[in-house]
Amino acid sequence: MRLLLAMMKHETNTFSPVPTPLQRFRDWGMHEDRAVVTAYRGTNHPLAAYIDLAAEIGAEIVTPIAAEGMPSGPVSREAYDYLTGRILDALATQGPFDAALLDLHGAMVPDGMTGGEGPLLKRMREIAPGLPIAATFDMHGNMTDEIMANATVVVGYKTYPHVDMYKAGEQCGRIMLRALKGEVTPVIRFGQAGILAQTLRMGSDEEPMQGAIAACLAEEARAGILAASIFGGFPMADIPDAGLSMVVVADAGTGGGHDIGQAACDRLLAYAQATRTDWFHVHHPLDAAVARAKTIADGPVVLLDHADNVGSGGTSDVMTVIAEVLRQGLEGVAMAAVWDPAAVQMMQKAGVGATITLELGGRTAMPSIGLAAKPLTLTGKVRRLSDGEWTVRGPMYTGSRVTAGPTAVFETGGMQIVVTSLHHEPWDAGIFTHIGIDPAHCRYILLKSRVHYRAGFRPFEKHRITLDGDGVTTSDNTRLSYSHLKPGTYPFN
Ligand SMILES: [Zn+2]
C-alpha cells in the first residue's frame, strides 16, 4: 500500500494586516520530504497519527510537505501555490497512491480566493480521479461544499484548546484504512448552520461547545455513524462559507447510510439553532473590568487581551489593555507577549539590568478596523534575554520545538512583559518558564489569547477576567464590516 501524507495549515484572518508569505510558514514550521517524518513523528498532530498508522500496516509513505503558519492575513499566492504545488506534484509523479491522508486547517484564504482547502482537494481529484482522500480539519475550519465533494472522510477536532489533534488523525485515518479494506463505505453529510459563531465562545469545557461535542459523541455511538464533527468555524473571515457547520461521516455499506448520516447531521444542526444566541461574547468596558481584577486578592488571575490574539491573526502589538493595566497600577503581572522585534534589539543592545525608555508595541496599523499604529512610551528595566526557543511539555503541540524568535523581558511598573521577535500566542507556559518567569507565582497572568491559553495555564488559573481591548480579533461585531457572508447569516440578518 502507498499513501500520500501531507499537512498544510493556516487560519486566515481577512481583517488582519499581518502579511502571510511563505516565510511565515518557515518561521513556525515547514518541513519537506523525509524531514516531515522526523519533525512530526511522536508529536500530538494528526500527521503523527497518520505516520503511526502507515507504519502499523507497513504502508509506503510519500510526505512532500508539512507546513503550518501562525494565523495572519490572506496567504500570498506564491506561498499557496508552493504548498499545494508540492502536494499536487507528488500526487502526479510519485504515485499511484491508494489514498491520501491530509492534515488541514479549513480556514485558509489565499489572496483573491474565498478558501484554500477546497480547491486543493478538487485539483487532487482532477489529477487522480476517485483518489480516496481523508482529511482532518481544525475545529475553526470554515467548511465548504467543495471540500465535501472532493473528500472521502472528514474529521474535526473535538477539543478547544486543541489537545486531541492526534486522536482526530487516528480516527480519520482508521476510517480510511477500513474503507480501503472494504469494511465500510464512507459517505459525508454536511450542513452549514448560518451562524457566524465567535471563537471566544467555543471553549470545549464550557457551553455551548461542551453540549455540541457531547451531541457529536452521541451520534458517533449510533449504528452506521463513523464520525460526527462540529466545526465552530472562524468568524474573522469575510468569505461566503464562514461560520458554524456540522459534518457527519456515515457508512453507506450498512444500508440506509445516507439517511442515517443526514438524520444525524440534522440533529446537530438543530442543536446549533437551539443555542444560537449563546455563541456570542457580551462586552464590558475595559476600565471597569481591570478595576474588578484589582479587587481580587488571590491569584493567579488570568487576564485575557483577547482582541489582539495572534492565534487568530492579531498583530500582537496593540497596547490598549497593557496601558490600562499599568494605569490602574496592578502589581505582580506577568504579560505575554508583545511582538516588537525592534524593542528586543534595543534591549539586547542595552543588556540585562539596564534601565531604558522605549516605545513598545504599536508597530502595525489596522486599516480594516480604522486603528492607527500606537506605541506606548515606557521606562523600565531589561530583566532577561533569550533565543525564544523551547520544547513544549504542555498538552497542546506536545513534544514540538517552538520558537518566538529572540525574546526579552521588560519590567515596568508592576508588570514583566515578554517581548518577542516572532508572533506567538501564549498557549504554553514555556513562553514564561523558558525565560525565568514562573507563572504559578504571579498574581496576574496577562495573555494575548482567547481560549488556547487554557492548554498551558488552566492549572494556574484561579480567576479569569476577559478584557475587551482593541485589535483585529475583536469579538465586537460593530467594529467589523462584512460584505461577503451568505445572506441571512446570524447575527447579521
Ligand atoms: Zn483552531
Image (spheres, helix red, strand yellow):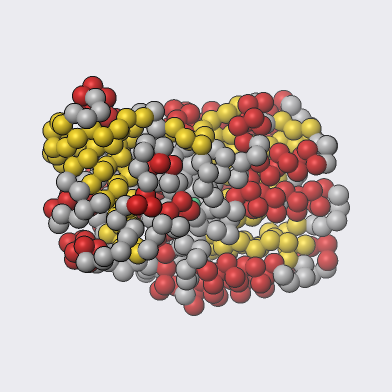
Instruction: List x then y, in percent, for residue 378.
Output: 14, 39
- Location of residue 43 in the rendering, given as x and y in whole percent from the top left corner: 61, 41
For this view, does 478 lie left or right of residue 208? left
Residue sitting nearer the eye, 265 or 129: 265
At 65% from the left edge and 63% from the top edge, which residue is drawn?
228
- From this viewpoint, which residue is outermost toward the top? 349
Residue at 39% from the left image edge and 28% from the top image edge: 387
The residue lying furthest to the bottom in this view is 274
Q: Is residue 40 visible?
A: yes
Q: Quadrant of the N terminus?
A: top right
Q: Position of residue 259 (x, y in %)?
A: 73, 71
Return the x and y of residue 13 as percentages of the image width and height. Answer: 39, 47
Q: Is residue 221 above or below residue 52?
A: below
Q: Residue furthest front?
A: 441
Q: Is residue 175 left or right of residue 331?
A: right
Q: Is residue 101 left or right of residue 59?
A: left
What residue is drawn where x is 70% and y is 50%?
A: 170
Q: Quadrant of residue 132?
A: top right
Can you say whether 148 is above or below 28 in the image? below
Of 300 and 187, nearer the camera is 300
Q: Quadrant of residue 290?
A: bottom left
Image point (34%, 58%), residue name: 300
